[in-house]
Amino acid sequence: MRIFGANEFASSAARHIAERLRSARSAVITGGSTARRIYTELRRFEGIPNLEIAFSDERSVPPDHDASNYGMARRTLLDPLGLTNIHRIYGEDDPVEAAAAYEEDVRDLVESGFDLVLLGLGDDAHIAALFPGAGAVSEKTRLCVPVERPDGMRGITLTLPALLSGKEIIVAADGGGKAGAVRRAIRGDEPPDAAPVQGLAAADRVTFLLDEGAGGLLS
């Protein structure tokens, strides 16, 4: 776990991630406001190779939609860094078909293990699009599934078996609104069904990158 000052969080988290990406061949990236701030800083770093990039989840929207994780990542990170080896979730397609297609697309990467998996953390302790109480959290065999999101949108997400293939997993969170979720993630003993981030608890390769607000309830 690393805790940074609020003003330096995005740049410090980006530096930590950039150091790992320089030797990586594959990575999972995510969406969300925390990721957007990190990507804006991450594109300032040199030496990141044109590695294979996959996505943790996507909303059922086309890539030019404001809610598209791919669209956000493309604008803030992928295009500025010239990253073109992208495994995109086709959110514009039927979610069941898109999930099945994405599972086949990333199967070899999962089997070899992603070098890095970057995830955000919701204030309800969700990761990717694995939300409390959703059946997707308990999925044991499929690597990617369609989901119904709490915001009323449909979506597609990698499952815990896929995310846990990561050789290194980073969970990034900032702001006091995430403090409760961070405490549940690090000190809690809830089952993943209640706090999906707990699905990572068995892995010894998880690093939390936090600002002082997100880590405020750990002392």
Image: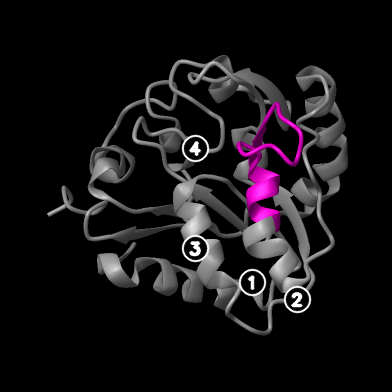
From the viewer's perspective, tell me whether residue 83 is left or right of residue 197: right
Secondary structure beneath dot 2 equals loop
Q: Amino acid at mark 3?
A: Ile
Question: Of the residues tagged 3 and 1, which is closer to the observer?
Answer: 3
Q: Quadrant of residue 26?
A: bottom right
Marks 2 and 1 sit apart, C-alpha to C-alpha, by 7 Å
| Foreground tag (3 vs 4) | 3
Q: Which mark is residue 38?
A: 3
Q: Which residue is mark 1?
A: 21
Inspect this view and state whether residue 207 appears. Answer: yes
Q: Tell me which corner region of the image, top left, top right, bottom left or bottom right, holds residue 126.
A: top left
Query: In whole angstroms, how far apart are the C-alphas of marks 1 and 4?
Result: 21 Å
Residue 4 seen in the current view: no
Quadrant for the N terminus in the image = bottom left
Mark 3 residue element: helix
* Residue appearing at x 58%, y 79% in the figure: 44
**Of the residues tagged 2 and 3, which is closer to the observer?**
3
Q: Name the outermost residue toward the bottom.
A: 46
